[in-house]
Image (cartoon, helix red, strand yellow):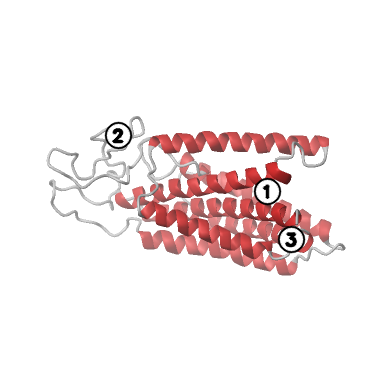
Amino acid sequence: MRSSNPVFSRRGFSRDNGYAGFNAQQPQAGGPAVGTNPYATGNPYAQGEANPYATNPYAPQDTQLGAPQQVRGNVMTIDDVVSRTAITLGTVVVTAVLSWLLLPVDPANLGKSYAIGVGAGLVALVLSLVQSFKRKASPALILAYAAFEGVFLGVISAAVSTYIADGVVAQAVLGTMAVFAGVLIAYKMRWIRVTRRFYGFVMAAAMGFVLLMAVNLLFAVFGGGDGLGFRSGGLGIMFGVIGIILGACFLALDFKQVEDGITYGAPREESWLAAFGLTMTLVWIYMEFLRLLSILQGDD
């Protein structure tokens, strides 16, 4: 089982095509030994899969059942994930604010600002794909992606706030934060359980959603207007809500992957991959909120 996030789906916190299960029960007599993976890719409920990080010299060292583990220093921790995510998201926010201030979207400069924003978005897309296919995390590449993504978001946000719905950006930011906090609480309280069925449902829904949006974009490019109308009116509102729900599901999958990596001793540098994946998911949610709120306020 892998996250729908392109970073995690390509590489994730796994080794040898294995999947590190997070929510394993405490070891019991007759149960799997400490360090085994009860959620292998082939069967998420199979027992006895070896720790996918067993080859990591810094991973927790397995001992006898019930005995304490010896943990070395170069493993990923939640502090590593939080700090790297803060740096990556901070880069997005800073560059977004700077692009908003330095690239005005007044009529005299609108075309130039749009061109810079779209160009930055394309560069961010290329950098994200390059990082997704790299074998190791590259902090410089991830931060470069965050910077270009911030430029794109800053230009789009300024344009929406200026010409479509004033104040919608702050609402989209608050909505994104609320979704993040809500999913995190629900995940920690085990109200959301990431199972293989959950993963399959989210992936099927995501593929259908992306396919419909791609078809709508093609119709819009070659036919003009809003294509099939998936991004305006009642259909636009419905697909905006679906997009936000899918983003929330992506967050749950990402949280599980992060906690799997921590539980099974992922190398510390993989915290950059966690930050990268979480940033992309939050950008997705923000864009869906921005689109949805623009439709709602634009209809007023």
Farthest residue, direction front: 300
Tell me the amino acid under the disc marked 2. Tyr
Q: CA distance from mark 3 to mark 1?
A: 25 Å
Residue 300 location, x and y as percent?
75, 57
Label drawn at residue 165: 3
**Mark 3–mark 1 CB contact (< 8 Å):** no
* Secondary structure state at the residue bearing disc 3: loop
Q: Residues within 10 Å of mark 3 (few under 14, many from 20)?
A: some
* Secondary structure state at the residue bearing disc 1: helix
Q: CA distance from mark 2 to mark 1?
A: 40 Å
Label drawn at residue 45: 2
Return the residue at label 1: 122
Farthest residue, direction right: 108
Tell me the amino acid under the disc marked 1. Leu
First-in-chain label (2 vs 3): 2
Residue drawn at point x = 74 percent, y = 60 percent: 165
- Can you tell which of label 2 and label 3 is closer to the viewer? 3
Left or right position of 178 against 17: right
